[in-house]
Image (cartoon, rainbow, N blue to C red):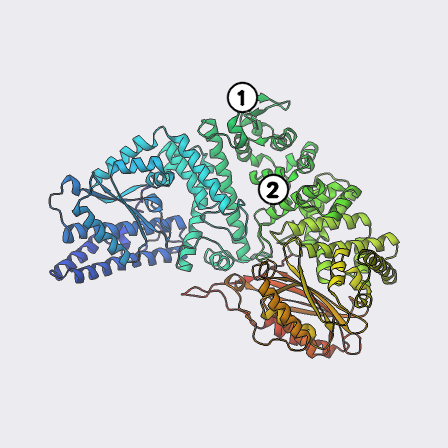
Amino acid sequence: MNVKSNPASAGPSLVDTRNSALRRPGRWRISNIIDGRALRIKLTAAAQHHQGDPQAARKVVIDHLHAALFRGRMIAQERLQQGADGLDTARLLCAVQDEVISALYDYTTTHVIRARNPTEAERIAIVATGGYGRGVMAPSSDTDLLFLRAYKVSPHTESVIEYMLYAMWDMGLKVGHAFRTPQDCVKLAAEDVTIKTSMLDARFICGDEALATDMFELFQREAVKGKDAQFIADKLAERDARHARHGDARYVVEPNLKEGKGGLRDLQTLYWITKHMYGGRTLEDVMQNGPFTPHEYAIFIRAAKFLWTVRCHLHFVTGRPEERLGFDLQPEIASRMGYRDRGEQQGVERFMKRYFLIAKDVGSLTRILAAKLEADHKKKPEGFRRFLPIRAPQALKETGFIIDNGRINTVDEDVMASDPLNMLRLFTIARREGKDIHPDALTALTRNLRAMNDRVRETPEARQLVLESIMGGDRPGQVLRWMNESGLLGRVMPEFGGIVAQTQFNMYHHYTVDEHTIRAVEYISDMEHGRGETIKLVSELFPMLENRRALYMAMLLHDTGKGKGDQQIEGMKTSLRACQRLGLPEAESELVAWLVGHHLEMSETAQKRDISDPRTVAKFADLVGSLERLRLLYILTVADIKAVGPAVWNAWKGQLLADLYNNTAAALRGGRTDEAGVLAELEARAERRREALIDRVGKVPALMLEMETAYWTGFDLDDLAWQARVLNDGQEVVAHRYLADGGAVAMIVSGADRTGLFADLAGTLARLGANVVSAQVFTSNRGRIVDIFMLQDASKGAFAAGDAPRMARLEKAMRDALADNAIKGEVNARAGRREAAFLVQPSVQIRDDLSADYTVIDIAGRNRPGLLHEVADVLADMKLSIHSAHVGSYGERVFDAFYVQNARGQKMGTKARKDTLKERLLAVLGREEPDAPQTPARKLKRSRAVDSF
């Protein structure tokens, strides 16, 4: 598309504005930024001044051209910072480049390699292709040029091209170039869709315009006309392959702006297909010629402006062609684009929500174009349907609905407009028939969404259809994702609409809140129907559930309180409101609200508390109150963790949750949830475990028999059997085994206890690069320890997987630490750029009420290597022995809990002593605080890390 000069009022300013009171700059005019005539006069003067010295003339010419480029770039950056949109910025940068290249061409052909009467072989045109041809350039984009010749290569044209290319390279431009005839262009376009796409964007810059015009006409006639179907198929295949490379998910929290799903390349694919079919020159011309309504055209332009604005900021901030919107860059870009904190939401979260809403709009536009292509028979059906003969539409029993070539469709768009409930029926029909939904139907739905208002969604039939859409069938995730993509889910359930495209600024969650929620519902369904990875306890519990619908509703609504304050308290309010509007019985509504209001409790208790402590179990049992609630909360918690992201769920988290479930269920079944009753039940369970272990392995090491109840209830029988094999009475033991899921390696360490031993062990692990993600600490009544560490490496995989020598070095170092000969030295605690983007507030709480026998110390702070070692050092220095440690890392943060006693085997005691400990621990947590991430030019802004759960 052509670059349009922006008309502006006359005046001496370099950057015209409509009104000085407006924040955003007004239209620009290229002559106010680069005076092409004055620039050429300077170049001619340089040639005349340095006659006889071409190198000196060349240096001055390049300096003038580079200065013009630099000036244009600085003005573009200033305008962007003042609020100009990115599309405007990209066009300005393109116009600047046009002026510089045109001036260079004129200088080269006038003063360096002149052809006074060019022959046919000496004709040359310079054509912009690719993004530069479209008239939009990001600040760090390549300059794609086609040097067009009439037919054969001549020394003159080769010399012109060589001189220009070296000059552009010396100016710092990254030039991609080709040297072809018009016939070459057409031939190569037929062979390679990438070349064809680049030529589709081609635009004349300078040189022989008649030659360029001939090529454009030949290309349209030979490569474009009548070839829509193949081009469309190629571009859609190219899009699908790109999505597969970058992860076929639109809502990953560090998106690739250019190549990711819903990003700029998807938007450009819409533009290319539309231009191939309908023609046009500028972006606006092309899209107005296409199959879009004025409202959809406005959405396209809005998306293009937003994505280009983000991209231009990214390039200017980093000084390179950065396309990934990483955590380190998100706060800075959000600030530059004017997103500020509002209520409970940070500016960076508001910015990222806007980004994902734009990505969602791009998906909607893609569906609309796909519907048009199929209607015109220019897009082949996908999947197995492409092998089937096209059948006439089959009418369904619901008025207005048909099966159209294997998919659910409507007879026309009026079906949605005449009865808004047909929007819901579309999904229930698709689920019942086991069919995909035709893009025509989704387009009709999207165009009529506003008809789904309060009056419609509160009718009894609407309520029933909503529940049927959510709960019907054995794969609710697919229907929910269709409804969410179309925008209908947020319309029929406004509470869910509030979390659509919402993000949380932390490294723990991998997806937006709505995507996480739908994945969680899918996991519940998969576990219920035995698909994918099975969890034995979940499979046992599902047949016992009395309130299956409440479980699914709670999962769908569990995060609707995010961004409003305390997410559990606010979530109770939003979920109760949603259930009441849907007409659920009062008891069921209250159960859903209770589950939502306590959906974090089981995870936090299992991972942050000693679940073998009678008080922990008694308090949790009192909170839950019934076996049905316990079953529902357990399944909901498992699904919630699994849906956070890849590799977040693992075997030891599963074991912790299962142990908490079993301990609590035993207390509830026994009818006594007081501490004495819980203790009796735990001791009985421990005795059963001991007997089962003896039956399996025969002789059990004496050290294990000396261990307290917590040890025997803290592991399953397989773990205990492994420990029995490796433990030898009276000897120091270090051994390991990799977990079946590959998520971590378990290391067991046993020997004589001493003050500071845990700190030495933790320090050894840190210095050798092992990241402790869980630690269980036990001491026998004869003063010998059994500590179990779960270890990962820096990439979140099992430590030393496939590297036996590295594991051997670690085991030797741990034996040395047992012998009071621990290795010394600094731990490399440098945070990466992504981690440094988060402001993490450290906290320490010291409580005596959580356990009958121990003081519980809760710490939270920035996750870094060696932190556990430093904390344990402080505890050892204050003569506190660690009874159990509960270590958990959640992205950029850690939440650790320590159950401790003083040297006399008692709780800590005085407030002064607790204050001293808190002060020292806060000092440790605040140590090694990284500087903000930075570019060569500046430090970047940071934002507060939000709650990781």
> Which circle marks residue 391 in the picture?
1
Amino acid bearing label 2: Gly
> Which circle marks residue 490 in the picture?
2
Q: Report how many numbered discs are placed on residues in the image.
A: 2
**Image location (x, y in percent) of residue 768:** 58, 69
SS class, disc 1: loop
Describe residue 411's horizontal placement relative to residue 290 as left or right: right
Describe residue 720's horizontal placement relative to residue 321 as left or right: right
Q: Which residue is rendered at x = 73% and y = 55% of the image?
A: 657
Q: Locate residue 724: give its quadrant.
A: bottom right
Describe residue 898's horizontal placement relative to residue 837 as left or right: right
* Front in this rendered view, residue 312 or 542: 542
Q: Locate residue 20: give its quadrant.
A: bottom left
Q: Which residue is rendered at x = 84% and y = 54% of the image?
A: 666
**Image location (x, y in percent) of residue 520:** 65, 46
Amino acid bearing label 1: Arg
SS class, disc 2: helix
